[in-house]
Image (cartoon, rainbow, N blue to C red):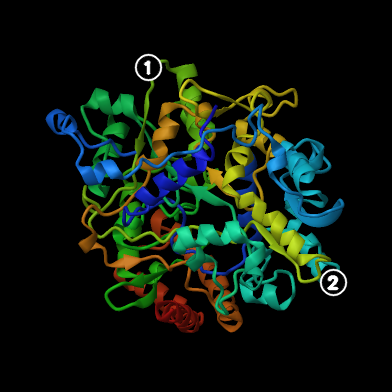
Amino acid sequence: MKKYTRLLAALLSLAMMLSLVTACGGTAAPNAAPETSDASAAQVSDAEDAEDAEEAPEVDEAESEEEPSSEEAEEPEEEIPEGPVAGDKDFDWSVFEPLAEEQTTLTMFYTQPPPLAAIMDTPNDMSYLYQTFEKITNVHIDFQMVNMMDASTNFQLMIASGDYCDIINDALNYYDTYDQAYEDGIAVDLLEYADCVPNFLNLLEEYPEIKSDLLTIDDHILNMPRVDMPVGVSADAGFLIRQDWLDELGMEVPKSYDEMHDVLAAFKSEYQISNPYVMPYQVLSPWGLMAGGYGITAVADANNFYVDLETDTVELSTISDAYYDYLCMFRDWYNEGLISADFVSYQQNLPDETLISTEQAGIWFSDVSYIKTYQELLSSINPDAKLSLMGDPGIDAQRTGYIANTTSVAGSGGFSVSETCKDIELALKWCDMWYDPALTQFINYGYEGETFEYDENGTPILGGCIVNNDLGLPSLKMANGVFLCTSGGFIYDLHKYDLEYTDLQVAAYTQWLNAAEDESTVKTSGIPSGAKMDVDEASTVSASMSDITTHVAEMALKFVTGATELNEANYNTYVKEIEAMNLQEALDAMQSAYDRYLER
């Protein structure tokens, strides 16, 4: 017998505890412009999804043996009801009452990455979750399947036709401003149907930061997103470093830019390698790493606005004095041969595997899912090779002045219900069941004996067809996307795939979090996700920043490689060029959105 709803209770408890930790910097871009659509980014995120406790205080023995006081004795210990959980072999599914008296069909706009789209015509074919939800709710979902590579086009065609699906997955990803989705009838306001979504609203009450992220300018909530637990305490990208080389040289994992320089110089001198630091081909990192220590954001292909917390003023990172210092550092490293002379030719965010297999790289970017690949690749050619995790460096080892992170707790994805839905209340009740605490473990792990087993501690562990399938699926995440799900709105256990991960991968969740040790030194912040732009503001920013981000990328390469000499005079000319591209209009628009956020 297992404790009822123990998974959700554990996840929520851990998230509440960790949410008290301030300035937890993840590696997600803290500067991404609020409510600016980026369909390609949404597609990459979906693809990665498809593939992809503090110690108890010591108790004094003498104190623990004392008799409890009469007051303590009068307080009964709260009982946790025992019983099978949804998905257990002996669970009685009749505890869930159908949402409809007769079977009712609802349509759903649903995107899948190419590998999963090739395997199934609809999630109803193989997903235990959707099959079970149909049985217990009496609601059949007619999926309008769309290959994610064509999702944006198909969505626009649906808008043009006026023939909307009842439920639309990830609807807000296709809008510059979310309130426009409400005006178009693509998404109803959940707050207008509070009686239909009690589980979801309970979650918002438990975590007000989620509600803050979801509220539009006009105070609508239009989507029911996937909420990752633990909330906001997991990093998915960072640096790997050759620990065996550090050991041979008697050096430590660097924490500051100066320490990193010294390690790279030692790697180059001792091992004669071509890529001590594997520079991203755009100079600016896709994850915004290597700039946070300067108190700015420098994310490839992003707007890179940030907030001066001392004046509450929105600024542009890529014309700042700090950005000049950032570029100078990379120019010097490039001239010293600490960065490959032909780094621009790699044209991918993660390093070419040949650099790793030929042992020509010392420090490089990785995401959590690739760590195991690099470990296996290195061990196959050098059994003594060893990797370690490296945090994003700072100005000093304490990361003094490191920019405050503003990673969104709840994104724009998940379920939305359209205004044209034949039964809005039924559709919302169906979506709300995905947040039912009694179903959280089932949604994450499925059926005992089929997709998971309990370990000796009573903890569910993915197994069965998720681990061993005959479809040739290469990862637990891919199999999960077929037999359970990855898209939609529900409470998602971030650690469900730990079985597949190495110790280094599991450690990366927290060791790649970056923040200043002394919060009082933090003077800058990314743009908060709650600072949402209206239609005119979004249009202004989009029109101005398109040319600006292109020019920033071009000049970053020229400054670092020396094609344009990096000095104060040339940098000032570059700043004036950026300012002439209607920058002030974009800054004013972002400032307006940020001021409105502060007022709220």
Quarter residue 153 falls in: bottom right
Q: Earlier in the sequence, mark 1 or mark 2?
A: 2
Q: Secondary structure at mark 1?
A: loop
Q: Residue at x 32, y 34 (%)?
A: 268
Q: Is residue 363 left or right of residue 154?
A: left
Nearer to the camera, 284 or 102: 102
Cα separation between marks 1 and 2: 62 Å
Q: Secondary structure at mark 2?
A: loop
Nearer to the camera, 163 or 352: 163
Q: Residue at x 53, y 59 (%)?
A: 202
> What amino acid is found at the position of numbered circle 1 in the picture?
Asp
Q: Relative to residue 210, is residue 277 depicted above or below?
A: above
Q: Is residue 427 visible?
A: yes
> What amino acid is found at the position of numbered circle 2 in the picture?
Gly
Position of the C terminus by quadrant: bottom left
Q: Is residue 381 left or right of residue 142?
A: left
Which residue carries the number 1 mark? 384
Q: Residues within 10 Å of mark 2 (few under 14, many from 20)?
A: few
Which residue carries the number 2 mark? 162
Q: Relative to residue 16, is residue 120 depicted above or below?
A: above
